[in-house]
Image (cartoon, helix red, strand yellow):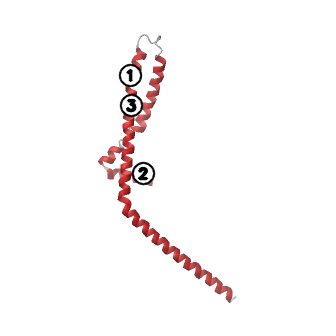
């Protein structure tokens, strides 16, 4: 019986040593990760701000281009459709279809593309970061 107790004690002692080693390794890895994050965090935040700025700015400019193009084409096609000889003109139905398509594209551009997040990042980046972090925690 004492042999079994000694074997159990030896296994427990061995497991305890392995757990202590694993715990020390885990703590050292955590400290290294914390040091790395603290050192790299300003650069990561700067890169995040640059990415979000340019991403939103490009979408904004693209939406403005789509809206401008759509407005000009819709006005042109509306003039074609509103003329007195519209019954004989072969451009009326394609013009109407084009107007509906461009109106839909304009609607999408208004909803998705017109945002001023890029302006907020440029003018008040700290406020943007606070709002962004708040949205991540939701």
Callout 3–callout 2 Cβ contact below 8 Å: no
Nearer to us of marks 3 and 2 is 3
Q: Quadrant of residue 58?
A: top left
Residue 105: mark in rendering: none
Residue reaching furthest right?
1
Alpha carbon distance from label 3 to label 2: 30 Å
Question: Would you call the spot at circle 3 few (<14 residues within 10 Å), some (14-19), or many (20 or more)?
Answer: many
- What residue is rendered at 41% in x and 15% in y? 82
Alpha carbon distance from label 1 to label 2: 41 Å
Nearer to us of marks 1 and 2 is 1
Q: Which residue is mark 1?
A: 75
Question: Would you call the spot at circle 1 few (<14 residues within 10 Å), some (14-19), or many (20 or more)?
Answer: few
Question: Would you call the spot at circle 2 few (<14 residues within 10 Å), some (14-19), or many (20 or more)?
Answer: few
Mark 3 vs 2, N-terminal side? 3
Give residue 117's position: percent from left, percent from top. Answer: 36, 44
Mark 1 vs 2, N-terminal side? 1
Q: Which residue is mark 2?
A: 135
Mark 1 vs 3, N-terminal side? 3
- What residue is rendered at 65% in x and 86% in y? 5
Q: Which residue is mark 3?
A: 67
Q: Circle 3 — which element?
A: helix
Up/down of 135 relative to 80, above or below: below
Up/down of 115 relative to 133, above or below: above
The answer to whether residue 130 is visible is: no
- What residue is rendered at 46% in x and 17% in y? 92
Q: Circle 2 — which element?
A: helix
- What residue is rendered at 37% in x and 33% in y? 65
Left or right of 11 in this view: 28: left
The answer to whether residue 103 is visible is: yes
Up/down of 75 relative to 57, above or below: above
């Amino acid at each position: 019986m004492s042999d079994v107790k000694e074997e159990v004690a030896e296994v427990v002692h061995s497991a305890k040593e392995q757990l202590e080693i694993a715990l020390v390794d885990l703590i050292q890895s955590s400290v290294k990760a914390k040091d790395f994050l603290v050192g790299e965090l300003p650069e990561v935040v700067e890169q995040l701000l640059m990415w979000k700025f340019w991403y939103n700015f490009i979408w904004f400019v693209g939406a403005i281009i789509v809206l401008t193009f759509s407005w000009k084409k819709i006005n042109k096609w509306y003039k074609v459709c509103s003329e007195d000889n519209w019954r004989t003109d072969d451009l009326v139905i394609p013009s109407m279809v084009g107007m509906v398509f461009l109106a839909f594209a304009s609607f999408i551009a208004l909803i998705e593309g017109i945002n001023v997040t890029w302006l907020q990042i440029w003018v008040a980046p700290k406020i943007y970061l606070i709002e962004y972090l708040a949205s991540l925690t939701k």
